[in-house]
Image: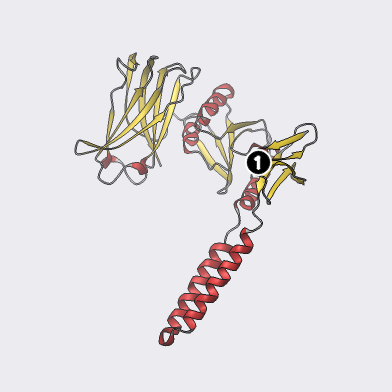
Amino acid sequence: RFLLVQQNHLPGWEVLVDGASAPVHRVNVAAFGVVVPAGEHDVEVRFVDPFVKPVLVVQLLALFVGMLLLAWCSGACRMWWLSGWMLLLGLVSWSLLGHRPLQERMANDIEMVQEELARSRNAAVLFHTDRPALLRRSSAGGPTTVIPWGAEAWVSLEQVLRKGRPDTLLWAWAGTGEDRLARMVLADRFASRDVLVGGPAAGLVRWSGRIPERPPGRERGGYLEDDGLVLREGDLPWSPAVEIPTAELGPADRLLVVDLQHRGVREAGPRVAFERRSQGRVTGYDTQELPVDTMLRTAHAPWDLAEVAPGDDTLRVYVWNTSATPFTLEGLRIRTFP
């Protein structure tokens, strides 16, 4: 089988099949490919520019040699200029040599995750990643479910949790960071969170214990609609707004999450609106498309509170249906998280 990659064929392209380098064949100026054996394989296509490092070395050598000559010829201020040159040389050297590339750090973090998974063979594993090929080589634990990276990852997460209702769950990630909205969904169902691997590129957390009696986070307001509030463009597109004085938000409040109960269909166009005001004037406005899941009848919308400007005194949150298809809102709750 021939795997075709539609990309300009330039020097530096490398294709790995199951971790081993494979010969790259030129198709035309805009495509190249590689021969892949029959069956299922992990294929990684990456570009390694062969000219970047030599050019960077030549540029830095020319820069620092020129600066050294200027500092040496600066007369009475020579020592000051030489000290500054040495400081700049040290900072640049540290920035270039003081950290490992992401691929190396991720490989080390994945190895640590793999070791922890091997010690917990009976626990269910949820793996949130944008690189599923990494998972295939590290799923040494119990039953593993891949949660794909994307805006609706929480939908897959809630479906898995409602189907299995595990007492203990391992939440792992690679290449995505620990999703804060997924962390909120898990905190709604488990009482204890233990970090097993906390690397920046990949990590593993054990969630266990009974569902907490009170949802985590600090409640900031909300309401229930007994008969449901029908939102429809052209009739009643907006729900009542929940107003939050920004003076009540402290330094620990970093994430705002809107929880909704609804009866909606995928054809509807619900969005959550975040409106910032100062002395009655609108100073900022942001909306998020609300993923509608007809099975769960729930939805969550996260919003970064760093968007609140120092001069804003009120934050208003409401639901807006941009479609003529009705969207029935049954309840809205707002919480803040660290």
Which residue is at 58% across, 43% downward?
Answer: 175
Which residue is at 43% across, 81% downward?
Answer: 80
Q: Residue furthest bottom?
A: 76
x%, y% of residue 285?
A: 32, 35
Q: Nearer the viewer, residue 136 or 66?
A: 66
**Dot 1 corresponds to which residue?**
30
Which residue is at 33% across, 20% downward?
Answer: 224
Looking at the picture, does residue 271 appear above or below residue 95? above
Which residue is at 41% across, 42% downward?
Answer: 338
Q: How many marks?
A: 1
Q: Nearer the viewer, residue 247 or 10?
A: 10
x%, y% of residue 191?
A: 49, 34
**Whether residue 259 can be seen here:** yes
> Is residue 157 rendered to the left or right of residue 265?
right
> Is residue 127 rendered to the left or right of residue 327?
right
x%, y% of residue 131?
A: 62, 39
- Identify which amino acid the numbered label 1 is placed on: Ala
x%, y% of residue 14?
A: 70, 47
- Quarter holding the N terminus is top right
